[in-house]
Image: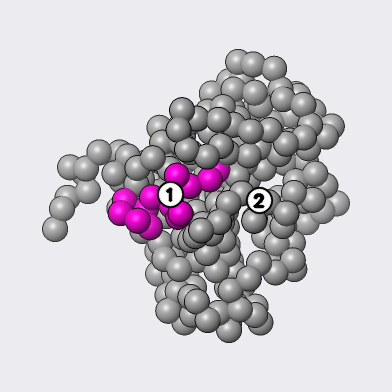
Amino acid sequence: MIDPQLMGGALLGRLVFRLPEPTAAALPAGRHALTFPEGREAVLVVPEDLDPDVPVPLLVLFHGAGGEANKVLPHFVRWARARRFLLLAPQSMFPTWDIVIGGHGPDLERLDAALLQVASHFRLDPARLAFAGFSDGGSYALSVGLSNGDVASHVIALSAGFMNTFTRNGSPKVFIAHGRSDTQLPFETSARQHALKLLEEGVDLTLLPFEGDHVIVPEVVVRAIEFFLGPQA
């Protein structure tokens, strides 16, 4: 067995990113493309009426296999605008996330770069920085979020298939939602197993089974946002 301590930080799924002070002006409200030397851009949604003197929450949203930002953003954009949080949607370099294909690599590097770009324009709230995703994106959120709980305060996994962590850091709160009738990633062999493992480890876990297949359900999104930000006043 390989000793994780002998592996580099990137191979362990560790982000370099740490919250810096902003160095540039805040971006205006709307949709922005964050570009990289290669690969697909990340999408940043900025809500209106952000107070520059108040640290802003950030939710990072990972799409499913074969997907793109536009397939998951519509489920969350209205909430970003209503609850005034930044919404960042990276896009995988390949059809799905690097950890699913063979290990951490370009997607982790691009996530680091995207987070740094966002933090250069906005003062982020370290107590409200969530990694979220659906399907393979949910697996990615679980894996990277638990490996970087000193960065992510919350992890939201919607219909995730697996979690792959060589090391754990910090103590993020975890929300898992999964359809009881999921035909792609059965509840009993994915969500239930994840929940049992996390509860054994003392993780602050919210498990939400729902009646449905491998889909994003609006009511579940509402619960996920409340888990992240608390009930709406």
Q: Position of residue 180 (x, y in %)?
A: 58, 82
> What is the three-letter code of the residue carrying label 2?
Asn
Q: Which residues are magenta?
A: 90-103
The residue labelled by disc 2 is: 70
| Coordinates of residue 184 in the picture (x, y in percent) | 50, 76
Residue 156 visible in image: yes
The residues tagged by marks 2 and 1 sit, at their Cα atoms, a distance apart of 16 Å
- Decide: few, some or many residues near mark 2? Use Cα within 10 Å; few <14, some 14-19, many ≥20: few
Q: Residue at x 54, y 23 (%)?
A: 20
Tag of residue 94: 1
| The one of 49 and 70 positioned closer to us in this rendering | 70
Disc number for residue 153: none
**Left or right: 20 in relation to 202:** right
In the rendered structure, does residue 41 fall within the stretch colored magenta?
Answer: no
Residue 204 seen by the camera: no
- Within 10 Å of disc 1 (Cα), the crowding (few <14, some 14-19, many 20+) is some
* Residue pictured at 31% horizontal, 51% vertical: 103
- Provide the secondary structure element on which disc 1 rests: loop
Q: Quadrant of residue 199?
A: bottom left
**Left or right of 34: which side holds 192?**
left
